[in-house]
Amino acid sequence: MNENKKHNFGAGPCILPESVLCQAANAVIDWNDMGLSILEVSHRSPEFESVVLKTQLLVRELLHIPDSYAVLFLQGGASTQFSMIPMNFLKGKSVAAYLDTGYFAQKAIQEAKHFGTPVIVGSSRDKQYNYIPDYYDVPSEAAYLHITSNNTIEGTEQFEFPTQGIPMICDMSSDIFSRMVDVRKFDLIYAGAQKNMGPAGMTMVIIKNELIDTITHEIPAMSDYRVLEANNSLYNTPPVFAIYTAMLNLIWLKDQGGILGIEQKNIKKAMLLYKEIDENPLFYGLAQPAHRSRMNVTFKMYDESLEKVFLTFATERNIVGIQGYRTVGGFRASLYNALPIESVQVLVTVMRDFAAELGLHAPLNDLQGAVGLARQATS
Ligand SMILES: *Cc1c(COP(=O)(O)O)cnc(C)c1O
């Protein structure tokens, strides 16, 4: 055990299980007693090819992925998928449908403009992206519908996925493996690994073979799903260490009772923190309750002038990574799979202690009074 370990609420790269870090560290020195580091072994060696295979099998097993889908481990982050998707699927079609749910959805929309016309079929921009909009008027001629299941920065999450009769594409970067989803509802799922899967450097794509078969035009090889699938993610040198560590992390996940097991823990962690946010007179949540993310909890203080003081108070108690994204402000506590519930308990206690130091005792009903008291206490 690392006694120096912080309570890491960072949004990504983020906390990984300590046992996974230890195994990965050992493999950097001597992988499987081969007398070689994992960093020194050919990606074409049978040893590494079996890592790719095993990681794919774990992904398939954990998410119940049918054989009619390919599982790819690519590079360039989720951000590269923003352009690869329209590059592969928008050709010859005039429009693609996008749901505008926040910062990363916006980035995907911007990239699609290089290849065609993204049509925004729903947006929560009117309320600072604090909810997931409905999307009913999806044009039937659209090449696909692109959605973002979890909005990492705004702290909203989509729990229902109405299908539309056109290919469904989903950015699941920040909630993949945190809960069970029915993969068969989607034609392409992608996720940057650094939020719930492993270290940065690898992007997973789960793609229906039928969708790959629709590509007929010329595309640069590194962006062509046909080439990447035909070479089983080994068209060029893949991110060897990121794939290996993701494999270790998925073995860890399996030992936690798989996705259903971790989902129950994630629900408990999120409930614990949202309850405190709702009850503590100093704080309020940003997302509408029905769309609250279990992975990224965004909140602010009624009295913004106290936010810096609280951040210092929390940092002194070994809590890191809770500062909100620069465009949102306030706080964001990310509760990814590897974060133990004990860390959430520590954060909740620190929030209560802070209120107590100001002479407040949660829960208080009179918020105005509470903020007034808080002001007095700090002035
Ligand atoms: C982090 C994130 C991205 C960007 O991922 P990169 O791997 O840094 O390109 C895209 N979408 C979502 C939902 C994210 O959380």
Image: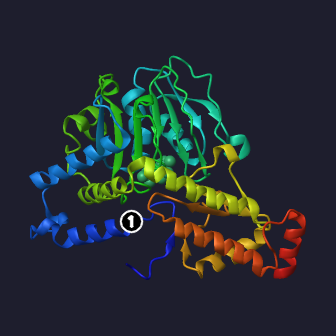
- Left or right relative to 250: residue 326: right
Which amino acid, mark 1?
Answer: Pro
User: Which image quarter is the N terminus in?
Assistant: bottom left
- Left or right relative to 344: residue 74: left
- Left or right relative to 85: residue 150: right
**Residue 368 point in image, percent of width and height:** 89, 64
**Residue 138 point in image, percent of width and height:** 58, 23
Q: How many numbered dots are placed on residues in this image? A: 1
**Residue 363 point in image, percent of width and height:** 79, 66
Q: Is residue 321 visible?
A: no
Q: Residue at x 69, y 47 (%)?
A: 289
Observer-nearest of 110 and 281: 281
Height in image: 270 above or below 27?
A: above
Q: Quadrant of residue 35?
A: bottom left
Observer-nearest of 332 and 234: 332
- Left or right relative to 291: residue 20: left
User: Which image quarter is the C terminus in?
Assistant: bottom right
Residue that carries the numbered disc 1 in the rendered image: 17
Q: Is residue 152 visible?
A: yes
**Residue 278 point in image, percent of width and height:** 74, 59
Q: Residue at x 81, y 81 (%)?
A: 378
Q: Secondary structure at mark 1?
A: loop
Extreme residue in the top direction = 140
Q: Residue at x 63, y 49 (%)?
A: 292
Q: Is mark 1 within 8 Å of ligand 1?
A: no
Q: How is the image coloured?
A: rainbow
